[in-house]
Image (spheres, grey):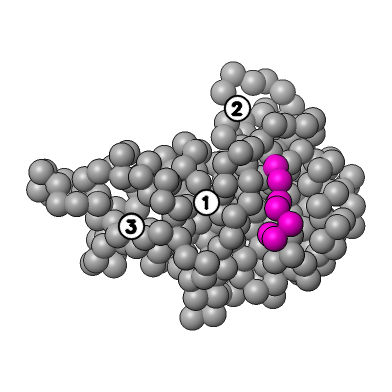
């Protein structure tokens, strides 16, 4: 099946927005575009990451079809909604395939070991997963490594669309795979430099080099008021927001 759209389930950092204990203008904002759950996207049956708010995100978007899950890496804000996947065992009536780097699979098996082998407990909503090492390609989806600090994480590409969350360096080989991209969703965690993420200036530099027709910034903290920054960003660049639907060229 051809993938037609990407749905931004969440576009927030690991703290989310609003952030606990913060009374800044963005955290107190009533603008729904400033409400940012942890980062994930959905690609017509393929789920990329399982953040802690996954159940709420899927219910909000009325998504009832997940055929497989790809994990970009094993940080808590990208995996801790994993138990919500058990609903798709009920819907699909079979184990759910998940794809990740080998070390990420090891982490997931340590967190929910009962989901990868016959559990001692019978019943009670125990999920059942099939773990697979992520290949270079899954149907239309291409997977390749970028860097999140020193950690290799997966970037996702579908034809003229690419999704790069949690990145502070794109190796030359990955940059070559992104040249000619039409739509780019890219990490721009905050305004000031960050040791393991692109900040705004660096993200805009990468966008300028790749020159996509459209770019959306994601994994955003509370530095960004949606309305204010929408008026400041260069032409063709926008902030993501939860629930954003992006047609895939």
* Crowding near the residue tagged with mark 1, few <14, some 14–19, many ≥20 C-alpha atoms within 10 Å: many
Disc sitting over residue 19 in the figure: 2
* Crowding near the residue tagged with mark 3, few <14, some 14–19, many ≥20 C-alpha atoms within 10 Å: many
246 is higher (above) or lower (below) than 72: below
Which residue sits at x=49%, y=38%? Answer: 75
CB within 8 Å, label 3 to label 2: no
Q: Quadrant of the C terminus?
A: bottom right
Between the C-alphas of marks 3 and 2, the distance is: 33 Å
Q: Earlier in the sequence, mark 1 or mark 2?
A: 2
Secondary structure beneath dot 3 equals strand
**Image side of residue 151 versus residue 24, left or right:** left
- The residue indicated by pointer 1 is 72
Image spot of residue 121 (x, y percent): 11, 43
Check residue 173 for magenta coloring: yes
**Image side of residue 81 versus residue 43, left or right:** left
85 and 33: which one is in front?
A: 85
CB within 8 Å, label 1 to label 2: no
The residue stretch that appears in magenta: 168-174
Image spot of residue 114 (x, y percent): 21, 45
Disc number lying in front (3 or 2): 3
**Image side of residue 103 versus residue 157, left or right:** left
- The residue indicated by pointer 3 is 131
62 and 1: which one is in front?
A: 1
**Image side of residue 106 versus residue 187, left or right:** left
Residue 69 makes an appearance in the image:
no
129 is higher (above) or lower (below) than 50: below
Secondary structure beneath dot 2 equals loop
Figure disc tally:
3
Q: Earlier in the sequence, mark 3 or mark 2?
A: 2
């Amino acid at each position: 099946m051809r993938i037609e759209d990407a749905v931004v389930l969440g576009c927030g950092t690991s703290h989310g927005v609003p952030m606990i204990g913060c009374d800044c203008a963005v955290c107190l904002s009533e603008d729904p575009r400033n409400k940012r759950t942890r980062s994930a996207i959905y690609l017509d049956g393929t789920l990329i990451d399982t953040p802690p708010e996954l159940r709420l995100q899927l219910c909000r978007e009325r998504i009832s079809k997940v055929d497989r899950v790809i994990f970009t890496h094993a940080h808590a804000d990208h995996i801790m909604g994993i138990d919500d996947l058990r609903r798709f065992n009920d819907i699909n009536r079979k184990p759910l395939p998940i794809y990740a780097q080998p070390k990420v699979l090891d982490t997931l098996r340590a967190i929910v070991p009962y989901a990868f082998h016959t559990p001692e407990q019978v019943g009670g909503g125990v999920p059942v997963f099939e773990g697979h090492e992520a290949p270079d390609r899954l149907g239309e989806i291409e997977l390749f490594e970028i860097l999140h600090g020193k950690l290799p994480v997966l970037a996702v590409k579908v034809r003229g669309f690419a999704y790069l969350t949690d990145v502070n360096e794109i190796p030359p080989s990955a940059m070559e795979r992104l040249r000619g991209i039409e739509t780019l969703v890219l990490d721009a965690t905050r305004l000031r430099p960050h040791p393991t993420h692109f900040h705004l200036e660096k993200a805009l530099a990468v966008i300028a080099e790749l020159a996509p027709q459209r770019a959306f910034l994601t994994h955003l903290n509370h530095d960004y008021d949606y309305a204010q920054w929408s008026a400041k960003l260069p032409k063709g660049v926008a902030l993501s927001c939860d629930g954003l639907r992006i047609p895939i060229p």
